Image (cartoon, grey):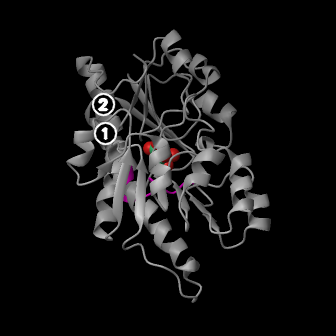
Amino acid sequence: MTKVLVATVKPFAPAAVEGIKKNIEKAGYEFALLERYQGQEELKEAVKDVDALIVRSDKITEEIIQAAPQLKIVVRAGAGYDNVDLKAASANNVVVMNTPGQNSNAVAELALGMMVFQARNHFNGKAGSELKGKSIGIHAFGHVGSLVAKIAQGFGMKVFAFDPFVKKEDIEKHNVTAVDTVEDLYSKCQYISLHIPANPHTINSINYDLMMRMPQGATLVNTARKEVINEDDLIKVFEQRSDFQYISDIAPDNKEEIAEKFSGRFFFTPKKMGAQTAEANINAGLAAANQIIKFFEEGDTTFQVNK
Ligand code: 3PG
């Protein structure tokens, strides 16, 4: 019997797990669950007889793939698939998919939520500032970026975007000003909201030059991946600009240094929280289950990312 394992260190909401189980069993497959596992050894043991895997940010390395001789498909229930070794998957004839757009609203809401929290001094009682009238630059205008733009417009912000992979006219349909270069985006916007994936082109790409371009009252908002920030440059910018703030869904590796030196100018979630809503879990989890069923039943590879 085809066996589908949901392996999540950070569990889905119970309603999402129930929905996935129901759909998998209705399709006639075996459902298995491994939540909050303690390390790669436990995951390795659990994958040895599975045909399909549903994961979140769980690390699917070459070792895990090789420990699963029956594995045919891995679906990352979410957007970013930098946690899956695509090369190893392809080499072992394993299809990898993501579920684009399914958890985007949760991430977009968190971006704006963190912005309000920071602008109001973490609700400490001191007068803060409003988002209305401020400029925000959306760095990459995909599913999350376009939702952040929409919510920011609701706050009365001036919205700009840069995305070399999206036509200017498609950005402008959202009443967002599309700019031609990334430098221009950072030069224009007090807030920058990051929505780029982590890959060899983007890792460490948010550097001193970009951060220093931001106008007075700069706040960098990161609900993407911590790896895209050049952390040495971040410290330099914090040191040279007393107005600079950084808020991020998951702390940078040098968080102790930042906490020690730049009190009040940062906020980091203790665990990655962007997609952590019941709605996002249900949307992404069910999409993952349905994509697996369509793959086995119809050979559908619509959301494959390792073609
Ligand atoms: C994503 O890439 O979909 C988000 O970063 C959410 O990741 P998570 O499923 O690990 O919370």
Figure quadrant of residue 48: top right
Quarter holding the N terminus is top left
- The answer to whether residue 150 is left or right of residue 258 is left
- Residue 209 vs residue 174, the one in the foreground: 209
Quarter holding the C terminus is top left
Q: Which residue is mark 1?
A: 287
- Residue 123 vs residue 282, the one in the foreground: 123
Q: Which residue is mark 2?
A: 291
In this picture, is 20 found above or below 156? Answer: above
Residue at image point 29% right, 64% down: 153
Query: Considering the numbered disc 1 on the image, is that residue within a helix, a strand or a loop?
Result: helix
Hey, what amino acid is under mark 2? Gln
Q: Position of residue 180 (x, y in %)?
A: 38, 40
Residue at image point 23% right, 54% down: 175
Hey, what amino acid is under mark 1? Ala
Q: Main secondary structure of the magenta part?
A: loop
Total marks shown come to 2
Q: Position of residue 291 (x, y in %)?
A: 30, 31
Label 2 CB-ligand 1 distance < 8 A: no
For residue 275: magenta? yes
Residue at image point 27% right, 17% down: 299
In this picture, is 140 found above or below 302? Answer: below
For residue 93: magenta? no
Q: Residues at badges 2 and 1 in contact (C-beta under 8 Å)? A: yes
Q: Which residues are magenta?
A: 272-281
Q: Position of residue 117 (x, y in %)?
A: 51, 73
- The answer to whether residue 50 is left or right of residue 9 is left
